[in-house]
Image (spheres, rainbow, N blue to C red):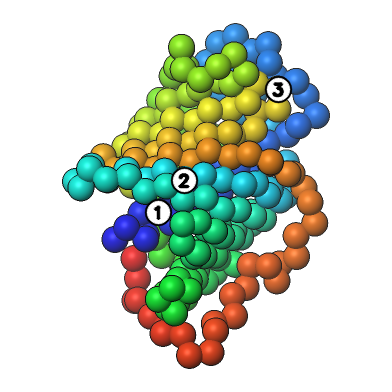
C-alpha cells in the first residue's frame, strides 16, 4: 500500500522533527556518543515546526523514482499536516486520533478513524527520542554530507522496532535540526526527505489539523492498516 508506506515515513519524520532545541551551538561534538547524548538531551522541548520539504521515493520492485514537494506543519502531540503541492496536490493529515488522506484529483478521502490505536508501532517507537541509543544501533557516518551536518545511521535493535530496515538522519551541527531523513523499508523501498526554511515554535492552532471532507467527495473508511 504505497500511500500508507509514504504516510509512515512522514509520521516517523514528524516525530523526529518536533523538538530540537536551538539555543545552544552543538557544532563541536566529536563522537557518536556525544552526538546521541546531545540529541537525546534536546529533543522534546519545541511544540511546533513548519518547513518546506522535497520527498524522493524510490521503488525497489519497479525501479522508478517519484519526486514531490510541499510544506509540513507538526504540533505535539501527534498532530501533523503534510501538504503536497507538486507535481500533484494531496494531503496527509492527522489530529492525533483520526487520519485523513485527501486526493483532490481523485476527489477521494481515505479516513482512518482510530488512528490512535492502530498502526502505531512507529509512533510508539519514536515518540520519545531520549531512548535513541536504547532503541537503535547508532553509527556516525564519516564522509557523508558536509562539514555543517552530523550524519547518523540508525538500525532497530529489535525486529518489532518499526516497519523499516534502515534510517539515516542528517542533523545540522549548530542546532541539531533534522535537515534530511533517508528511510529504507523492509522491502528496500527508499523515502528521501530533505527540509528547508524550518520554523520552530510558531503559533499553530489545533483547527489546522482537522479536515473538512469536501461535498461530493468519495469517502473510504478501511477497518485498519
Q: Secondary structure at mark 2?
A: strand
- Please give left or right for residue 1 compared with residue 218 in the image: left
Q: Quadrant of the C terminus?
A: bottom left
In the displayed orientation, state which residue is furthest to the bottom. 216
- Please give left or right for residue 130 compared with residue 207 in the image: left
Give the image location of residue 124, x and y in percent.
Answer: 48, 50
Q: Quadrant of the N terminus?
A: bottom left
Tell me how far mark 2 sits from mark 1, CA to CA.
10 Å
Residue 139 seen in this snapshot: yes
Q: Which residue is mark 1?
A: 6
The structure residue drawn at horizontal position 37% and vertical position 30%, both measured from the top left corner, is: 155
Position of residue 162 relative to residue 223, above or below, is above
Tell me how far mark 1 sits from mark 3, CA to CA.
29 Å
Q: Are marks 2 and 1 in contact (CB under 8 Å)?
A: yes
- Marks 2 and 1: which is nearer the front? 2
Q: Residues within 10 Å of mark 3 (few under 14, many from 20)?
A: some
Amino acid at each position: 500500500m504505497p500511500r500508507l508506506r509514504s504516510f509512515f515515513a512522514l509520521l516517523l519524520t514528524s516525530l523526529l522533527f518536533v523538538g530540537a532545541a536551538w539555543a545552544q551551538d552543538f557544532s563541536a561534538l566529536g563522537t557518536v556518543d556525544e552526538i546521541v547524548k546531545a540529541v537525546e538531551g534536546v529533543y522534546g522541548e519545541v511544540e511546533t515546526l513548519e518547513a518546506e520539504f522535497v520527498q524522493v521515493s524510490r521503488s525497489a520492485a519497479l525501479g522508478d523514482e517519484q519526486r514531490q514537494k510541499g510544506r509540513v506543519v507538526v504540533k505535539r502531540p501527534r498532530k501533523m499536516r503534510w501538504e503536497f503541492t507538486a507535481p500533484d496536490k494531496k494531503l496527509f493529515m492527522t489530529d492525533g486520533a483520526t487520519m485523513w488522506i485527501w486526493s483532490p484529483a481523485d476527489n477521494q478521502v481515505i479516513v482512518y478513524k482510530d488512528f490512535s490505536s492502530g498502526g502505531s508501532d512507529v509512533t510508539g517507537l519514536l515518540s520519545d527520542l531520549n531512548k535513541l541509543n536504547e532503541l537503535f544501533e547508532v553509527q556516525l557516518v564519516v564522509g557523508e554530507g558536509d562539514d555543517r551536518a552530523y550524519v547518523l545511521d540508525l538500525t532497530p535493535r529489535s525486529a518489532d522496532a518499526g516497519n523499516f530496515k534502515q534510517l539515516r538522519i542528517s542533523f545540522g551541527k549548530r542546532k541539531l535540526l533534522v535537515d534530511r531523513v533517508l528511510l529504507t523499508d523492509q522491502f528496500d523501498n527508499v523515502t528521501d526527505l530533505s527540509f528547508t526554511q524550518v520554523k520552530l515554535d510558531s503559533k499553530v492552532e489545533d483547527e489546522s489539523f482537522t479536515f473538512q471532507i469536501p461535498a461530493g467527495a468519495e469517502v473510504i473508511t478501511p477497518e485498519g492498516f
